[in-house]
Amino acid sequence: MAARVSAPDGLQRALDLGLKAQEYALIVAQLEREPNGVELAMFSLLWSEHCAYKHSKLLLRTLPSEGPALVMGPGENAGAVDVGGGWAVAFKVESHNHPSAVEPFQGAATGVGGILRDIFAVGARPIAVLDSLRFGEPGSERTRYLLDRVVAGVGHYGNSIGVPTIGGEVYFEAPYEQNCLVNAMCVGLVRTERLIRSAAAGPGNLLVLFGASTGRDGIGGASVLASAELGEGDAAKRPSVQVGDPFAEKKLMECSLELLERDLLVALQDLGAAGITSAVPEMASKGGVGIDIDVSRVPLREADMEPFEIMVSESQERMVAVVEPSRLDDVLAVCAHWETGASVIGEVTTSGLIRVLDGDQVIGEIPVDVLVDGCPLYELSPSPPPPDLYAAPARTLDSNDPESILLALLSSPNIADRRSLFEQYDCVVQSRTVVRPGVGDAAVLRLPDGGAVAVAIDCNGRRVAADPYWGTVEAVLECASNLACVGAEPLGLTNCLNFANPEKPHIAFQLTESIRALGDACRTLEIPVVGGNVSLYNEGGGGPIYPTPVVGLLGALPDPARAGGLGFAGEGDAIALVGTGVPLLAGSELAKLRGEALPASLPPIDIAAVRATQIAVRDAVRSRAVSSAHDVAEGGLATALAECCLAGNLGCEVTVEDGHEQFGETVGLFIVSGPSSALRECFAQVRHQIIGSVGGADLRITAGGAQIDLALERLRAAHGALARLFD
Amino acid sequence: MKFGVIVFPGSCDDVDAQLACARVADVTPLWHADHDLQGVDAVVIPGGFSYGDYLRAGAIARFAPIMTEVIDFAAAGGHVMGICNGFQVCCEAGLLPGALLTNESLRFVCRQVSLDVVNAETAFTRALEPGRQLSIPVKHTTGRYYAPDAELDRLEAAGQVVLRYAPGHNPNGSLRDIAGVINEAGNVFGLMPHPEHAVEALTGSVDGLGLFASLRDSLTGVVV
């Protein structure tokens, strides 16, 4: 029986820790007593939004999680798909938004560290990182500070640990000014039979904590930072942000992979948000067992830490494993080889309880099912947002001249060349990178057996804000289009749902519609959602962020040598515009530059028709009959043509048919270049037209009565606008 | 002919270096905590962050147990190639002249650059034609080569500047565009670019292979 720490003010303390009054009442009812201080600290974290997904779990259950390639689905540290040849690829995207808004360098760095651990916790070697970033407009000093430190933080961790950062995306929009978004995705490679789950098993087996020692950093991060809106006094929350040590993580990673390679572990779990408090009960819950933890056996950085601090510490670079007693010596020897600390801190039991001990004294005792599954799940009360939820963006473009418009679009922060960011990341380490950032629409990594995987991550939050359903469909299709352009077939999807406060009906509406769209799009594309992450309460003083369901899509292609590039490659090649989408200016980047308010909705999309086009483009790229492929996205056809020219250092001459809005946006339109006979053959079954040819050193577009005739050098100068942010 | 590639716990490009070496000869990893070079014919110190490099890049690694052996090996005329972090370690260990400072931009830079082969008569470059340009990636935060002016004059006069960044390609502010230097005896070579990431057309370039092939040819007595 747990020692009773008198808690007459239990309810008030629960409220202070972020629990609701009815949740506290439920805890008391289920325990049949008041929780003591240690127990309350544990409940406040495991029943937080960040750990319990209490406002999103009911919706997430509607997502498709089955598919022919799926080998590990939602619920584990990361999902995984079969990529052939006995190999599986694990992948997941996760947010570190609030820590990054408070302390951008360490927030971003530990975001990368956390997602890396999720991947090697399932036994996969991390082979790539991608990041998805959102900031306010770059005119603001805060934005430039956050951008600079976040990019440095991502690089600091990824570069130091020897995992390439092969892509990502960044958007600048005013609603992210106070509450930036930092999402990191990791991809790992593992022999399918070596995938490991996190369910604890085998009463009498030992719980081994290994990696860094435990300190006071990140106390209460999950409840303090991740589960409430940002506001005044955030600087005082800096102690809640963890500090990353990539060198410790590198050793931890190699150590974990060797332990798994030698089959020494029963189960493995990383320590992330809420530390031991989250990791251990979840392992017990999955395995249907109990676990005793002795906090006096946890190696500490500060000797006088309180038991509850040890239980909730978010010190980075730690893992916990379940080990059979007969294997303990071998486990400790591997840890010693990698100079990684390791201690037995507990044992698997049949009690069905999480018992927290401090030496001989029991200081907490909670049934696993109450702690892990007892948190109430909330139905949302969605209602459509008012039309003026988001202010119209500031007008920055007055001209109607097509050349001026194109140059403005190319230099717009959301479209400008990302090279100045990507160059701060190692994209080549591990010798797998076949298509580097900026070369193709998706990054491509070769696999050991001769095949390859492609990865894309995307979401245009402004369009999701305009229309949560169709904007989310567009995000999924945009990623699938990116994969098609390098010749890859999508196998599985991960997502990070970044939204504001779901207890507000209009945010609930965004979240509900977005998840419905995600499910519908994935079902039509026949891909499973293998897992993901939800980040709610993303609101600063300026109101809610744009709803941002970041989509990470992983696909496979049979031959890395046939991966497609986006740049024009052959003088004299014909250029085809492929697809059925009808581009519109409403909700476009140009509409933003003109200061137009968001439209009330986006046009519906025939998802199956887009899929058919994507398949045709993918097959054309794989056949090597075509020279380049690029999808039309932000900034429309004219911008996409300019990108093809700049990437290939070749001009083109194009005539756009009447009625095609050359700066308008949609999904499912592609620019493909190659011999005209090959283009006609490849796209015989889908809508396409030859719109011009590759050649020269200028971009020439005739659209309606207007002309664009710009030298590549002028385009390049405009496209390089982002570099100035890093001067 | 066998290469040994040092593996520190924070090495990142050790596997890549082994793959590159394996294209031209045999190769074995050499663990940082050991005192045994396992009879290798040449040592490669790879890129990465040896022990985290929180102090100064390479400053701790020079004291590694295996480095004692590498320093003895080099003193006896053994051939050592230090790539990126390996170059930093060689400078810290006194095996190479000069030092590597933080990039002028103060940022990490990963970029494919063009290099001019200044001296094609070293054991590490003899398979390359003089004046040839190589396309090889750099990726580092601490790669700005520095030595006092008089030392730079001496190095240039003695042919110890082996590789230079081609005009317009200096990514870090290195003095006199220096990308790679060799010691006076000609058996220790350090460079910031990563030739092990330029050994296959599929991943970008084959121009780095010549450095590994040169060393193999030098040690196996192949006459070019």
Image (cartoon, grey):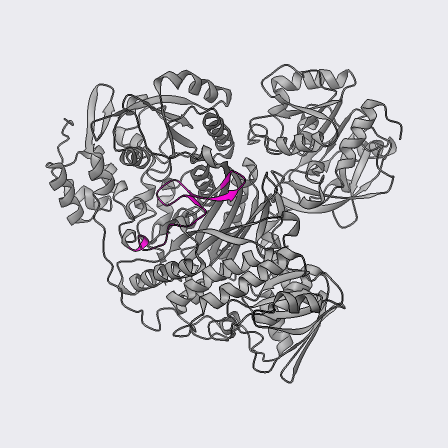
Q: Nearer the viewer, residue A118 or A289?
A: A289
Residue A254 located left or right of residue B184: left
Q: Tell me if I can see residue A270 in this picture.
A: yes
Quarter occupied by residue A165: top right
The residue shown at (38%, 38%) is A272
Q: Tell me if I can see residue A136 in this picture.
A: no
Numbered marks: total: 0
The residue shown at (53%, 54%) is A489
Above or below residue A642? Residue B36 is above
Q: Which residues are magenta?
A: A59-88
Q: Nearer the viewer, residue B3 or A677?
A: A677
Q: Quadrant of the N terminus of chain A?
A: top left
Above or below residue A419? Residue A449 is above
The residue shown at (43%, 59%) is A176
Is A529 a magenta residue? no
Instruction: Measuring from the top left, give residue A381's x and y in whole percent.
Output: 24, 62
Above or below residue A727? Residue A113 is above
Residue A191 located left or right of residue A270: right
